[in-house]
Image (cartoon, rainbow, N blue to C red):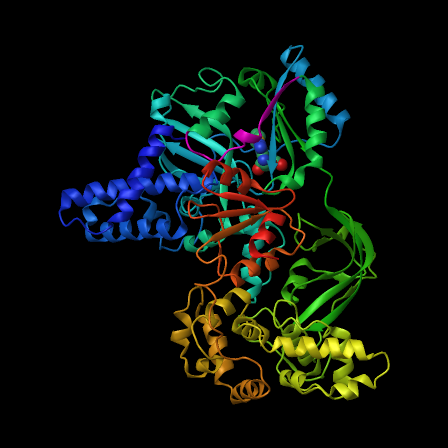
Amino acid sequence: MYTAEQEAQLIRLTETLLKDLSDPGQASLAQQRILQLRDVIHYHDWRYYIRSEAVISDADYDRLFAALRALEERYPQFADPDSPTQRIASTLTKEFPAVTHLVPMLSLENSYNAGDLRSWDQRVRELTQTPVITYCVEPKFDGASISLLYENDRLVRGATRGDGQQGEDVTPNVRVLRSLPLRIPLSRHGIQRMEIRGEVIISKEDFRQLNEARTAHGEPPFANARNAASGGLRQQDPSLVAKRRMQAVVYQISYAADAAGNELIGTKLTSHASNVQLLHELGFKTPYNDLRCFEGIDAVIDYCQQTEGRRDEFPYEIDGLVIKVDSLVLQERCGATSHHPRWAMAFKFAARQAITTLLRVDFQVGRTGAISPVAKLEPVALSGVTISSISLFNEDFIREKDLRIGDRVVIERAGDVIPYVVQAVTSARTGKEKPIIFPEKCPSCQSRLHKEAGEAHWRCVNTQCPAQLFERIKHFASKDAMDIAGMGPATIEEFMQEGWLHRISDIYKLDYERIAQRPGWRQKSVSNLKNAIEASKQQPLYRLLYGLGIRYVGETTARKLAEQVSDLRDFFHWTPEQFQQVQDIGPKVAASLYDFFQEPKNLEELNELARLGVAIQQQPAAKTSGKLAGKTFLFTGTLSMKRKEAEELVEKHGGTVLSSVTSKLNYLVVGENPGSKLEQARKLKTVHILCEKEFLDLVGK
Ligand code: IVH
């Protein structure tokens, strides 16, 4: 926590530093500059990760960071293990030694209804001999639990829960989490040693982006944020941890002692609510803003029921609420079983899980030839939708879960994430279940399947495979690519059966008179199709590039790539190294691009597209003209149009879409159920807040 005065000072200091980040050339001045940079970076980490409202742009943050790193390299005498630059350790972790928690990490008892809570309250009142109990209620974070040890104001250890007594020492990995302060002024509070509990979580938005990036790179998406976070904590390479966008929330002080070794819980620290406040003030991310205290269980029950209806409003997944006796003295009197404390109770929300039968597995051929197993399920309702089909990703997924045809399977839907199979209910097996046999040949063209070392997918490598062609054309014509309305799966299949589509460029050679003679086609639908196909010829370059369906090239990568050339054919002269120099393109994506552009058939196809009138050269950018030139936008909440369409509208008119609320933001467009961005933008006072209608007026739509 920073006082308003400290904040103002740090913001001023940031501005001064940003004006001149060069090496002052003299050791004493460099030392001062290093200390200032560390202070401001700590501050901006806190603004960004704890307060969720950055006051500087990502680019400026990166400049501060780079300057600090450069100075520390030049003046190694001023190195400090707690400098923000040291969060990203370069050494591999190899293995995680076992550590014993100071206080065992117990689990929580679960309750599901008012009755459960009433009987628990009665027991607490008996145990404590207290007529009315003050309870605190806070979110039950659905992540991976951690225990953190601070000594002499410094973070010295981070550990997973393990078996509750002993966990794995994952200190290098937790140090990477920018939401965790590495140094805190504990001594000022008379605390020399403190062990705290918390959860490593990934916000819903970060999780969505994480999975988008994984899918774009050909990796299977994570099933839910909890798995991604818990796997993330155990990554061998701390720099990969940073990529998972994990945050640490802390909710419990399990141990605190002063310099003489006196325990402070129950003496100096007397209530749960004030402990959470202390953690909040020390600069941790905590449930402080979502913590409520109530006298007696009835108010607790009301609040639990109300909050269950609002669970989707939280920016991260919660699977319930945790109710805790506020007084630490009374907590002590309640005690604990070997499994859970008697002073706390989880109120679990209705599960977003269901059990159904796995009827069969279909094998689908993707546009790059990857074979994906898809489970066909007995239809079952799951949080408001009927599920009858679910991706099983790849063969390893099936093997790991030992899934069999006829199994009863648990399926889960976490938030707005696609549903997935959690596990088979092995206890329900009858012995009649059959193994899932992965095909050896392509289900479409019967050619032999291949699997490269290190690859998760079996693949059909026949470039003429009809299933692949179908998927490639479907992708090319899709809304996010060339956006050819009327060229949906049924039409593509029909034209393929007629022998009219053998490659993408055939779309632009269709004979509309012959289409008009086919049953079911009217003059109007033919002319609509023709217009859509003609219009697609002028789509921006990145849409064409994305539409070509090159492996690992998602929309974002295609946008970045398209900015680099004036003609798509320029890529035929590029080396893998050149591809890698483009932001966010790694060796794997670069190799895939290089292979694609080495293939003479692909050059032939692009030449053919150009001959048929498809724009494969850059259209002049509208950036500096446009109504919104130089203006920045951000969206929050649900709009009546698709978010992507709104963003494209901004870009079309020369504006830029930002990814978070920063001082650079000009307009925030607010839809229904806006998220925390609205609050952040209001606080900044410099952001214009628009409703959708005002936004459309602005672009003249
Ligand atoms: S208190 C001794 N508070 O839920 C009691 N736990 O199902 C320690 N959890 O292992 C737990 N949010 O990992 C507590 N606000 C919260 C929590 C929370 C999530 C996790 C924790 C625990 C698990 C039990």
Compared across the picture, whether 167 is left or right of 343 comes to left
- Front residue of this view, candidates 616 and 700: 700
In the rendered image, the vertical position of residue 319 relative to residue 498, given as above or below: above
* Residue 162 in sight: no
Residue drawn at the location 44% of the way across and 67% of the way down: 586
Residue 283 picture location, percent across and down: 42, 33
- Front residue of this view, candidates 570 and 256: 570
Quarter of the image where the C terminus is located: bottom right
- Front residue of this view, candidates 289 and 162: 289
Residue drawn at the location 35% of the way across and 55% of the way down: 90
In the rendered image, the vertical position of residue 343 relative to residue 682, given as above or below: above
In the rendered image, the vertical position of residue 70 relative to residue 272, given as above or below: below
Residue 568 picture location, percent across and down: 48, 79
- Front residue of this view, candidates 19 and 304: 19
Compared across the picture, whether 171 is left or right of 107 comes to left
Q: Quadrant of ligand 1?
A: top right
Residue 296 picture location, percent across and down: 67, 17
In the rendered image, the vertical position of residue 592 relative to residue 240, given as above or below: below
- Residues shaded magenta: 282-295
Compared across the picture, whether 575 is left or right of 520 comes to left
Residue 454 picture location, percent across and down: 53, 70
The answer to whether residue 527 is magenta is no
**Residue 1 falls in image quadrant:** top left
Q: From this viewpoint, which residue is outermost toward the right?
A: 519
* Residue 416 in sight: yes
